[in-house]
Amino acid sequence: MHRSILTGLFVCILSIGVSAPAWADIAPDPGAGAAATATAPSSTAEAVPTEGADFAMWNVEPAKAEAPAPAAKPSKLLRLLHVQRFAGGIAARGAAMASALTRNALRFLGVPYSFGGTTSAGFDCSGYVQHVFAMMGRHVPRTADAQFYAAQPITGWPRPGDLVFFQTYTAGPSHVGISLGGDRFVHASSSHGVTVSSLHESYWSARYLGAKRIVE
């Protein structure tokens, strides 16, 4: 009888020792599995430093940020600024010179016409223009046609200081005046001496060849 009891206990112990691992494989605890998955790093994944980590501890170089687009070099910006200032200075000087030019031109209103004249005692048209420009330190040719070919053509209405040309007694440019801006110009007229006229006047509009520029 004692032998039967001992045999039964031995069988029970063997049953428990064999079946427990099998039962654990078949029905694992979901919570325990999830915890193991979350905390245990994969044996094949390579550990990398996270953002803000001390890279010296990892013995690696920090990731280099993408280089920004190169900014304009200060020297180029300075050159551009100098060019803009230079251009602005030229425009300002040109406007100042044109203003002084027209003021000087109007000083001679009423001076009589004199064929071949180049002084305040009497002017012809091109002599008058040459004299006014000489007062500003600018040399222009002596005759109307030479002044026409020496100046630069423009489009649109003339601005103060531009030269306006006309075809009068002969083919080609034979008369010249100094624009006051818009349609007004001052010139040495053979009938009125130094006077102000309009491009809209029928006589001048019919003979107008165009405007050209000497003062930039």
Image (tube, rainbow, N blue to C red):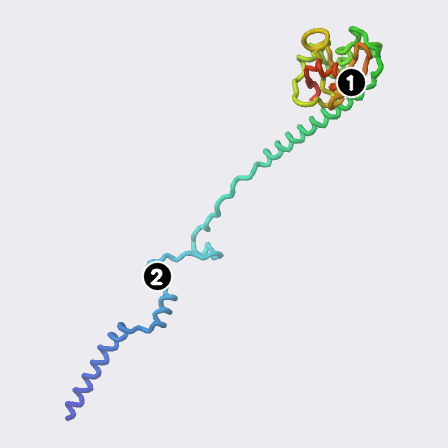
Specify the quadrant of the image occupied by residue 164.
Answer: top right
In the image, which disc is placed on residue 42?
2
Horizontal side of residue 30 vs 184, given as left or right: left
| Amino acid type, mark 1 | Ser
Going by the picture, which residue comes out furthest to the bottom? Answer: 1
User: Would you say 136 lies left or right of 46 here?
Assistant: right
Residue 107's mark?
A: none
Mark 1 or 2, closer to the camera? 1
Numbered label attached to residue 197 = 1
Q: Specify the quadrant of the image occupied by residue 107.
A: top right
Q: Residues within 10 Å of mark 2 (few under 14, many from 20)?
A: few
Q: Name the N-terminal-most of marks 1 and 2.
A: 2
| Residue plotted at (83% across, 16% down) | 109
Viewer-closest of 28 and 149: 149
* Three-letter code for the amino acid on which mark 2 is drawn: Ser
- Horizontal side of residue 38 vs 20, given as left or right: right
Mark 1 nearby-residue class (10 Å; few <14, some 14–19, many ≥20): some
Residue 64 in picture, x, y percent from top left: 47, 48
State the image coordinates of residue 17 (x, y, percent, origin top left): 23, 79
Q: Residue at x 78, y 22 (%)?
A: 100
Tag 2's secondary structure?
A: loop
- Residue 193 in the image: x percent, y percent? 82, 12
